[in-house]
Image (cartoon, coloured by chain):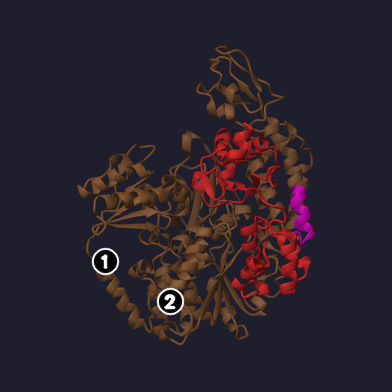
Chain colours: A red, B brown
Amino acid sequence: MEVKEIDQVMEKYGSDPADILGILMDIQEKERYLPRETLDYLSKKLDLPMTKLYRMATFYEALSLKPLGRHQIHVCMGTACHVRGAARILDKLESQLSIKAGEVTPDLNFGLKTVNCVGACALGPVVQVDGEYHGNMSALKVERMLKKYSGSENKEAE
Amino acid sequence: MFRLNSVGELEKLRAEISEKRDTGKPCITTCLGTGCHAYASYDVYDALAEEIDARGLKEKIELRGTGCHGFCEQGPIVVIFPSEICYCRVQPEDAADILAALMEDKVVDRLLYEDPVSGQKYEREDEIPFYKNQNRLILGQNRLIDPQNIEDYFAQGGYKALAKALTDMTPEDVLAEVKKANLRGRGGGGFPAGVKWETTRQAPEKEKYVVVNADEGDPGAYMDRSLLEGNPHLVLEGLILGAYAIGAAEGFVYVRQEYPLAVDNLSRAVEQAQGYGLLGDNILGSGFNFRVRIKRGAGAFVSGESSALVSAIEGQVGEPRPKHINTAISGLWGKPTNLNNVETWANVPFIIERGADWFNGIGNEGNKGTKIFSLVGKVNNTGLVEVPMGIPLRKIIEDIGGGIPQGKKFKAVQTGGPSGGCIPEQHLDTPVDFDRLQELGSMMGSGGMIVMDENNCMVDVAKYFMNFLKDESCGKCTSCREGTKRMYEILEAITKGEGRAGDIELLEELAWVTEKTSLCALGQTAANPVLSTLRYFREEYEAHINEKRCPAKVCKALIRYTIDPEKCDGCGRCQRNCPEEAISGELKSPLVIDTDRCSRCGICLEVCRRDAVVVE
């Protein structure tokens, strides 16, 4: 990330160390993760120790020290979705993508995460991909859903 | 938008808005809450807009996107005003029919709500049993308001309570009224809000803060989300009233980042309120100053705990702190801070405008007002319901919820989120309030109400909650960090058929230690789901441990999928769809599942048209 861009983000929050979470989240949204060099720069500019930034990054689920997938798959594991069988859907996704929840596929196309309740319980079980909601999901529907996001990379492989 | 310098100017504006609207012009509303949004209600809205345009009716018909109507199972929901005809499960293709019917003063029969049991259809929204049995005091405005348009809020009487408070009441009067109303916190704790306000007001420091806790973390609960998305000004007005009563000049709304629409709509509402002089300096010419800032959470359940939330706003990690001194006395940056839940704040304008006596007329002894619940899981009418406190659980699940789908049998209802417990059938006539549910080993909590049927395993449910808590534990307290982890491991072993004699007793002991020695409510109540399922469903635990059997047929290691040769016609659908290639056999003759390869994914059960797949 360019120094200029990082400065812009900091300015949005008045370069206030108390708003470090907001700053980190904006960077996360831009870069899909928190690059080490960016954290070094923030640490110097905001006079916050790296240990603090590391602590924030590892405490909050929304922040990531490693790049997320181009398409982020969030499987809702809220109670309502759970009782409607969300666990089976997660199993199918893990097996289909050959990764576990919390990981990213080697080609960085898909990242898989479990999330705790997206608040769309009537549609449960819910899987969110890039913010798009897929409701009334089942293990059977997983393959078809993934095809929508496979793009040209996978098409060539087929 | 222009600055209102006095209450008089506000009332003048309100009268102007009402007059402009009093034309009897039909209005088509489309629910744009997150639930309906996931059902593509935005496409429905666009289709309706196009249809109105195509017919040249833009000046004659108003189209409005509103907040959540609550009947999420039937979304996308479209309601026509003034007739209040309610259309359910509307698709973009239905737009033409809806307009045609409106022009001819008719209804589109196929889009009306149909009762799944009786088959009866209902035209008006307030006739539908789901709505009829509720008391939609707080949520009721959602259907009338476009959350992006403050004028809609004005038209509904918005900010009248604030005007009344700033002209006719002193801060002490406002506080006294909230105290008299016996408003108890809606976030789960049920602590009397008025008492908390008073403590904050009386704390010696001059600089004080008010905070809205919008970190709604209980999985399965989305009441606060719908309030913030659908009627952000209601919450803001409550907050401003609270700030006035307590003497705070600055407030924060801490919203979880998983609610982007709520953050959006709330930010816009704050800007609009500022523009009209309802926030900022010299509000409505009263001399009272108050500013609001919005802060986002970043995916940590524990940050919803009051002291953790205060830490998070300060820019620390959102971990709880020792509370021998209350946040009401020493909170944000050491200053007195009053923190309340979204729904709690939303009640305040009603209490101030209509009075505490009116509020005390709703609910039962010690539990006044209404409560919003998210009724979800194995229930026909999934959605947000608002009922007076003290209503029997059965009424919510059966009369409003419409009972269990597919004719299955009710097993339990989980309330209070990860801090709560499961309530079985024999206690369904219990009144729902803060106190009675606690007696049963659960709690009302923030309002999540998850219905479970005969196909849910209660040991699995306990394991689910413990898994959640072990991941969300901040790790500070050894008892919580290690306790949730060990309880989870024991539960996981039990569901895998590796349970041992003495496991139940060990769970009970761990529960006791974790409760007694954890710093915050996450650890203190972590064992509730286990203890409550043990209390009412002990035989399920015993079956898992002693017989290696899951009576509900859920726990993967303890079940097998087989094909009934009498029913199977060898069509091969299951074989084609099996991801593990575990099904073998010739077409047209009964197929067989290889249990060793089978991953219990349930796909074969889903695709079989002959009910030939059996789980045993």
* Rendering quarter of residue B614: top right
Crowding at dot 2, Cα within 10 Å, few <14 / some 14-19 / many 20+, comes out as: some
Marked residue chain, label 2: B
Label 2 to label 1, Cα distance in Å? Answer: 22 Å
Percent coordinates x, y for residue B590 in the rendering = 58, 14
Magenta stretch, residue numbers = B475-487
Percent coordinates x, y for residue B154 in the rendering = 36, 71
Q: Type of residue at label 2?
A: Gly
Marked residue chain, label 1: B
Which residue is identified by label 1? B21
Residue A127 in sight from this viewpoint: yes
User: Vertically, is B101 above or below A144?
Assistant: below
As drawn, is B609 to the left or to the right of B82? right
User: Of the numbered discs in the image, which one, if any, rests on residue B275?
Assistant: 2
Q: Type of residue at label 1?
A: Arg
Observer-side mark, 2 or 1, equals 2
**Residue B426 vs residue B307, the one in the foreground:** B307
Q: Is residue B577 magenta?
A: no
